Image (cartoon, grey):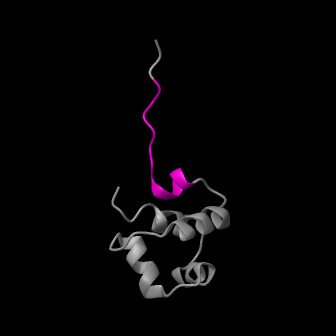
Amino acid sequence: MTKGYKLREIRTAKGYSQLEIVNVLNTTQQQYSKYETGAQELPARHILTLCQFYRISADELLGVELPAKETK
């Protein structure tokens, strides 16, 4: 997974356009496009806003995959 997280994948799966998300984040479409492509880091305030908006965890938004627990 690139630094672009899973922003585009989640946005399109939930049926939103970039313009709709830009309005939620109160940013520009050019800036949001940089987040989706990984050209720029997503600020923490936007991570929180998107998690609340999409009703998902930050791990899911950021594409974090935790290693499986080892059993003894």
Q: Residue at x 60, y 64 (%)?
A: 48
Q: Which residue is drawn at 59% across and 71% down?
A: 15
Position of residue 69 relative to residue 42, above or below, is above
Residue 3 coordinates in the image, percent (x, y): 35, 62
The stretch drawn in magenta includes residue 64? yes
Judged left or right of residue 12, residue 40 is left
Q: How many numbered discs, if any?
A: 0
Position of residue 2 relative to residue 39, above or below, is above
Residue 21 coordinates in the image, percent (x, y): 57, 78
Judged left or right of residue 71, residue 23 is right
The stretch drawn in magenta includes residue 48? no
Q: Which of the image's four quarters has the N terminus?
A: bottom left
Residue 57 coordinates in the image, percent (x, y): 59, 53
Q: Residue at x 47, y 57 (%)?
A: 62
Q: Residue furthest top?
A: 72
Name the residue nearer the viewer: 8 or 40. 40
Q: Please give the range of residues in magenta.
A: 58-69
Judged left or right of residue 54, residue 4 is left
Q: Which residue is drawn at 62% across and 68% down?
A: 49
Q: Which residue lies furthest to the front in this view?
A: 44
